[in-house]
Image (cartoon, rainbow, N blue to C red):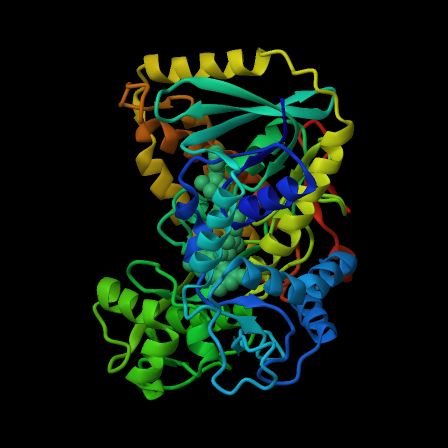
């Protein structure tokens, strides 16, 4: 029986794996895709740490900015822990080999990493590797895992956690390559399965696979999830493809203009404010653009080469000479699996979680750009170490295979039964519904409509199925399982949004435009328990 089973091979999972291994654990990392495919690779702008390399900065300022952006919904001790650990986390990543961009005029020769300003930050604090920051971090972590001979099991889709008496004993997976359902027994588990932004299908910067699979598995297993209504919309996605143009474009001096050429918002305000300002321009019938022409081609190619290419390829505009058409779309999910200070899932012993799937209460109602890459690495180390600590005293008696049998039967049923309804149009509908009615600006009437549509969709889901019946390499099956998870989570988002009669951070509700002190609480969902606010 392995000590620590890591589920998810993005930045959070790989960091947790390295940390658990360093403590002495036997580790397996299981993912539905290959590690280098994880969404972490898409992160462009940077990772925050108050190094003060470019201008004066302090850990206390990083803490204060993070708390301010969280709008009263963070755990200050967790924020303090993350921000205080940030400089050491950057040093650790640098030692592993992350090729951070450097300053030309290094002050001391010891800390020469370049830093840029992201929205809501009081200083130039985001360390970056051009605009490939996530990619470089992910590849470096993966290389290091390979060097450390960490065991990987790719193309294995998490189905369910295996639970005995409230303690995790492993998980079940569908081996995508063969169609076999397997159970992996482990003394402790780290869930690092990413967020649920793909619920906004067609209106998100996220990978299609960010369907909240781990969060749904926790709910089914009796664990708690929290703050699901807080979804961050990124102000600048390419208008037609939803591909992100990183905040660094504004951080480097880019403007937002409407079709009259007017600037209408301070571009470096927090994301929620900028996204709402763009949204209201669009509602007034304006088209909105990002203008980086004044930065000049040389600077653009030096600092934002990926974004220049993405604009040319997907929007057919050259940012050096043309305006970039943009719109705000769903980008980051602040809610997720509810954890205690050890990053252990509330409601499931021995199950730890880290990264975008978790709610460690560091982002609160609105995440600061650059704090997510920080969270996955700074807390990835903590999650891996704590998982191993739990494993040391955990029983090595494996669970029986009841869960595996149940899941095998379910997969067999999906592969054998003919169902009349195709789920793909419903996946589109769910995305449209969420963008229109559970989006940047909300109101109770539309939220209630969304809830009843989702409830009806859940009913129709019983008649949905797949057409490809082959057990091996069945993408149709995986996408259906992902859709089921997204649909399972949908009501948790909407009911929490309905209950929150206020505007706080990324949750903005018409009729309730200010914060309500009485609602400065986390919204918690746990099956079998009353839904509560704490
Ligand atoms: C376009 C873009 C740009 C961004 N830029 C920045 C930035 O500049 N700075 C910043 O701080 N943050 C940024 N973010 C946010 C940040 O990249 C993510 O929050 C972070 O990388 C999430 O890491 P993670 O390891 O938690 O999840 P992911 O990287 O999403 O990894 C999740 C892993 O879980 C696996 N998985 C999921 N479901 C299952 C399942 N059922 N079974 C098995 N495995 C599963 C996936 O295959 C994957 O390996 C950006 C995000 C996007 C989309």
Nearest to the observer: residue 362 or residue 384: 384
Q: In terms of image quadrants, where is residue 49?
A: bottom right
Left or right: residue 117 versus residue 468 is right
Residue at 62% across, 66% down: 513
Q: Is residue 423 above or below residue 239?
A: above
Query: x, y (%) of residue 228?
Result: 60, 47
Instruction: Pick out the residue farthest to the left.
Output: 316
Residue at 65% across, 15% down: 399
Query: x, y (%) of residue 239?
Result: 31, 64
Nearest to the observer: residue 68 or residue 360: 360
> Could you tell me if residue 440 is visible in this image?
no
Left or right: residue 144 versus residue 4 is left
Q: Quadrant of the N terminus?
A: top right
Nearest to the observer: residue 404 or residue 263: 404
Q: Is residue 280 above or below residue 496?
A: below
Q: How many marks?
A: 0
Nearest to the observer: residue 254 or residue 132: 132
Residue at 70% across, 62% down: 85
Query: x, y (%) of residue 372?
Result: 57, 58
Query: x, y (%) of residue 242?
Result: 35, 59
Q: Is residue 430 above or below residue 30?
A: below
> Could you tell me if residue 265 is visible in this image?
yes
């Amino acid at each position: 029986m392995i000590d620590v089973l890591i589920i998810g091979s993005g930045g959070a999972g790989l960091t947790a794996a390295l940390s658990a291994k360093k403590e002495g654990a036997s580790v397996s990392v299981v993912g539905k895709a290959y590690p280098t495919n994880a969404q972490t690779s898409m992160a462009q702008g940077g990772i925050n740490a108050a190094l003060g390399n470019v201008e004066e900065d302090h850990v206390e300022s990083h803490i204060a900015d993070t708390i301010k952006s969280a709008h009263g919904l963070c755990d200050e001790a967790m924020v303090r822990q993350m921000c205080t650990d940030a400089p050491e986390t950057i040093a650790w990543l640098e030692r592993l080999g992350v090729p951070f961009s450097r300053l030309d005029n290094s002050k001391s020769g010891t800390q020469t990493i370049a830093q840029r300003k992201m929205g809501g930050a009081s200083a130039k604090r985001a360390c970056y590797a051009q605009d490939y920051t996530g990619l470089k971090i992910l590849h470096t972590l993966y290389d290091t895992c390979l060097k450390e001979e960490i065991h990987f099991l790719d193309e294995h889709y998490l189905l369910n956690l295996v639970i005995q008496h409230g303690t995790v004993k492993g998980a079940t997976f569908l081996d995508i390559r063969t169609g076999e359902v397997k159970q992996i027994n482990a003394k402790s588990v780290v869930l690092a399965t990413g967020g649920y932004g793909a619920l906004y299908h067609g209106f998100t910067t996220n990978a299609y696979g960010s369907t909240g699979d781990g969060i749904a598995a926790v709910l089914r297993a009796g664990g708690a999830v929290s703050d699901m209504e807080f979804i961050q919309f990124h102000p600048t996605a390419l208008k037609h493809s939803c591909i992100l143009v990183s905040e660094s474009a504004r951080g480097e001096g880019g403007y937002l203009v409407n079709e009259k050429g007017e600037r209408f918002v301070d571009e470096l305000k927090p994301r929620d404010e900028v996204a709402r300002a763009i949204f209201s321009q669009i509602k007034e019938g304006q088209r909105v653009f990002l203008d980086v022409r004044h930065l000049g081609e040389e600077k653009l190619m030096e600092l934002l080469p990926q974004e220049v290419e993405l604009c040319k390829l997907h929007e057919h505009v050259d940012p050096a000479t043309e305006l970039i058409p943009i719109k705000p779309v769903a980008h980051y999910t602040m809610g997720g699996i509810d954890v205690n200070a050890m990053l252990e899932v509330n409601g499931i012993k021995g199950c730890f979680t880290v990264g975008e799937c978790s709610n460690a209460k560091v982002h609160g109602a609105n995440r600061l750009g650059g704090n997510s890459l920080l969270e996955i690495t700074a807390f990835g180390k903590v999650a891996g170490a704590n998982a191993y600590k739990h494993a040391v005293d955990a029983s090595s008696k494996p669970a029986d295979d009841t869960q595996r049998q149940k899941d095998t039967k379910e997969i067999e049923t999906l592969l054998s039964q003919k169902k009349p309804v195709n789920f793909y149009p419903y996946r589109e509908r769910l995305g449209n519904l969420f963008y229109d009615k559970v989006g940047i600006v909300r109101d109770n009437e539309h939220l209630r409509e969304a809830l009843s549509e989702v409830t009806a969709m859940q009913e129709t889901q019983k008649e949905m199925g797949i057409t490809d019946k082959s057990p091996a390499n069945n993408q149709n099956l995986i996408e259906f399982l992902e859709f089921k998870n997204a649909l399972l989570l949908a009501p948790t988002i909407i009911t929490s949004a309905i209950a929150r009669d206020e505007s706080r951070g990324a949750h903005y509700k018409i009729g309730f435009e200010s914060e309500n002190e009485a609602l400065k609480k986390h919204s918690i969902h746990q099956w079998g328990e009353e839904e509560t606010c704490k």
